[in-house]
Image (cartoon, helix red, strand yellow):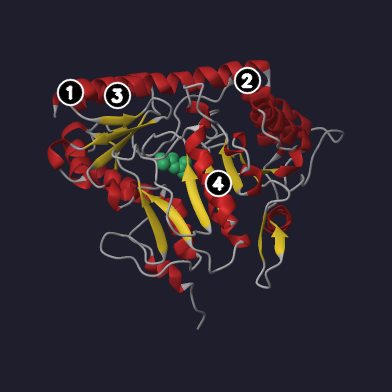
């Protein structure tokens, strides 16, 4: 009989968001008239920017004409998109990133899991607690961990607690860790990292020859001009960091699918015999073998993000969600709750009232207000006692949800 990848058996329950959907669907079946407002998964609700839609329509027409039709594109993405990203997202901020170092993909979630393909089995790995669950689960699937304990904490992973006491920014570990996942602006806590803080990680990674996986999927939501948008704004980061970016949240591409990963040339890790090997070449090889690129139509849509109209429309979208975040923060604060995040990030991280558990608060809100959030403990044991509320929804729904929540606290 064929055998399975037994590491999958170590995974705890379902992936967080399908598990929430399962509970919500069950509730909806039993309460078919309930008007459920979903502020759980960070999925966008507002229409795609017009500039992106128009570019995609034009691209559809291109596909209908033999002269402009495209078959397989470059696995790494079209050069016209990679050039715009390099210029607008990096070079304009003083980061030395070349178009050839940008790999277009269909999502940061996929890339942050797939990147493990090019790393060895015996790296020490650090994640924050709480954390975006994909970083943990993909390492479990790859066999990089032992079993989970009763709190869902996996043997073999090094957890860096992020709490209100440390401003949701992890302390630098005393020992050497090979692979470190950092996410700023942070999912789920909405915390941010200063340049000084990121410099301390870059210095650590440089000293230990570690690699930082830097997830910057939410950089567009930064409102404080002093905060870095990319780890490559930090001197030395080219030699120790891979960055993940996405069009999902800034341009509303969660359903359209386009993202990119930056792998600087010259960034190396060791082969078993101790030789330093360039990661760019390995990732290029991996992508060329296992991925056929993002569709031409979608890449044209993403390219339009960088047009003057696209920039204005994306800014308006981001501002819209951030106004939602402000409403959520203000309403919950006025109602007496302690809230974090929601200033430079679309997530508000709320302390549950009266010390009730994250899942109990989830159930309470679902049953009494028909509002869905995400239990903090779903992001890790240090998330217990917290609850994440996403600002991704219509204004009407956010206002209605907050009204329901504060009258039922
Ligand atoms: C979230 O809610 O944390 C995000 O939607 C996750 C994701 O983008 O995959």
**At numbered mark 3, what does the secondary structure look like: helix, strand or loop?**
helix
Whether disc 4's CB lies below 8 Å from ligand 1 is answered no
| Above or below for 367 versus 345 | below
Residue at 28% x, 44% y is 375
> Residue 147 location in percent, x, y?
36, 69
Of pointers 4 and 3, the one earlier in the residue sequence: 4
Residue on which disc 4 sits: 203
The residue wearing badge 1 is 335
Label 4 secondary element: helix
Left or right: residue 92 versus residue 360 is right
Location of mark 2 (residue): 310
- Residue 228: x percent and y percent? 54, 30
Q: Residue at x 38, y 39 (%)?
A: 41
Q: CA distance from mark 1 to mark 3?
A: 10 Å
Between the C-alphas of marks 4 and 3, the distance is 35 Å
Residue 156, by quadrant, is bottom left
Residue at mark 3: 329
The answer to which of 137 and 18 lies nearer the viewer is 137
Which of the two discs, 3 and 2, sits closer to the camera?
Answer: 3
Question: CB of mark 4 within 8 Å of CB of mark 3?
Answer: no
- Label of residue 116 in the image: none
Q: In the image, is 157 to the left or to the right of 209?
A: left
Q: Is the residue indicated by label 1 positioned so its CB lies within 8 Å of ligand 1?
A: no
Ligand 1 is found in the corner quadrant, namely top left
For disc 2, does the CB lie below 8 Å from ligand 1?
no
Mark 4 touches mark 1? (CB < 8 Å): no
């Amino acid at each position: 009989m064929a055998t399975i990848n037994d590491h999958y058996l170590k995974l705890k329950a379902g992936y967080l968001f399908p598990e929430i959907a399962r509970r919500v669907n069950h509730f909806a079946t039993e309460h078919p008239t309930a008007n459920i407002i979903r502020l759980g998964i960070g999925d966008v609700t507002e229409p795609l920017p017009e500039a992106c839609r128009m570019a995609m329509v034009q691209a559809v027409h291109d596909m209908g004409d033999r002269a402009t039709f495209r078959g397989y594109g470059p696995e790494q993405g079209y050069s016209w998109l990679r050039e715009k990203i390099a210029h607008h997202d990096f070079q304009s901020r003083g980061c030395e990133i070349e178009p050839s170092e940008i790999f277009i993909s269909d999502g940061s979630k996929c890339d942050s899991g797939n990147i493990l393909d090019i790393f060895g089995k015996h790296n020490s790995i650090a994640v924050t607690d709480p954390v975006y669950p994909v970083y943990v689960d993909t390492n479990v699937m790859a066999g990089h961990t032992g079993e989970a304990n009763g709190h869902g904490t996996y043997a073999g992973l090094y957890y860096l607690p992020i709490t209100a006491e440390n401003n949701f920014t992890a302390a630098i570990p005393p020992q050497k860790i090979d692979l470190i996942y950092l996410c700023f602006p942070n999912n789920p806590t909405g915390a941010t990292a200063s340049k000084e803080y990121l410099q301390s990680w870059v210095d650590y990674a440089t000293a230990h020859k570690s690699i930082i996986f830097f997830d910057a999927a939410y950089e567009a939501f930064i409102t404080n001009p002093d905060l870095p948008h990319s780890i490559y704004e930090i001197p030395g980061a080219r030699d120790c960091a891979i960055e993940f970016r996405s069009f999902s949240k800034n341009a509303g591409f969660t359903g359209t699918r386009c993202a990119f990963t930056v792998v600087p040339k010259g960034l190396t890790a060791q082969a078993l015999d101790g030789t330093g090997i360039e990661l760019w070449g390995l990732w290029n090889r991996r992508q060329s073998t296992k991925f056929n690129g993002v569709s031409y139509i979608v890449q044209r849509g993403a390219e339009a993000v960088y047009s003057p109209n696209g920039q204005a429309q994306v800014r308006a979208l981001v501002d819209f969600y951030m106004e939602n975040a402000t409403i959520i923060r203000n309403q919950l604060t006025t109602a007496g709750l302690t809230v974090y995040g929601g200033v430079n990030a679309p997530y508000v991280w709320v302390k549950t009232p009266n010390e009730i558990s994250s899942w109990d608060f989830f159930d309470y809100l679902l049953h009494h207000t028909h509002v869905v959030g995400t239990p903090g403990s779903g992001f890790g044991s240090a998330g217990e006692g917290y609850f994440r509320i996403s600002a991704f929804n219509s204004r009407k729904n956010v206002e209605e949800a907050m009204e329901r929540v504060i009258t039922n606290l």
